[in-house]
Image: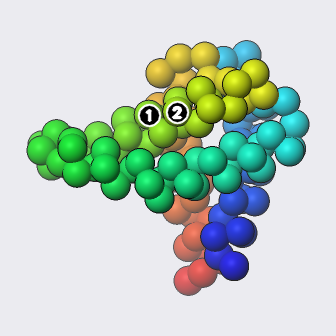
Amino acid sequence: MKWLIGIVINAILFIALSGFIGDSFYLSGFGSALLASFILSILNIIVRPILILLTLPITVISLGLFLFVINAVTLMITSGLMGDTFEIAGFGTAILVAIIMSVANLIIQKVLWD
């Protein structure tokens, strides 16, 4: 149940961020936001642990800040899989979205489940 709630929360965050960031982050609607959130959660289950293992030395040296880059890479993969309905203009935008989503998800999880 938490997984489905997390997907809906991420979809709402995607919509809010697409309105906040503007032209460099495009989302066609709530349905594509839900699909992008679902694809991102699947990528976080399958691809993210592999990326974390491959980049473990860099992550340790950067004191964990490289995880934002890994989150941005998964967002870019999601953008590539979604096509024209979910677009991120550049890697800088992906890092900004990853940082904002990480902080927002941390706050929301603390409020809902603690």
Q: Is residue 87 above or below residue 32?
A: above
- Numbered badge on residue 94: none
Name the residue beneath numbered marker 1: 73
Q: Quadrant of residue 97?
A: top right
Q: Residues within 10 Å of mark 2 (few under 14, many from 20)?
A: some
Residue for point 57% across, 63% down: 107
Q: Quadrant of residue 49?
A: bottom left
Is there CB contact under 8 Å for labels 2 and 1?
A: yes
Nearest the viewer among 80 and 70 is 80
Nearest the viewer among 87 and 14 is 87
Q: Quadrant of the C terminus?
A: bottom right
Q: Position of residue 67 (x, y in %)?
A: 34, 45
Name the residue beneath numbered marker 2: 77
Label 2: state its secondary structure. helix
Residue for point 66% across, 64% down: 6
Q: Quadrant of the N terminus?
A: bottom right
Label 1: state its secondary structure. helix
Can residue 55 be seen at all in this image of the molecule?
yes
Q: Mark 2: which amino acid?
A: Ile
Q: Quadrant of residue 108?
A: bottom right
Q: Mark 1: which amino acid?
A: Val
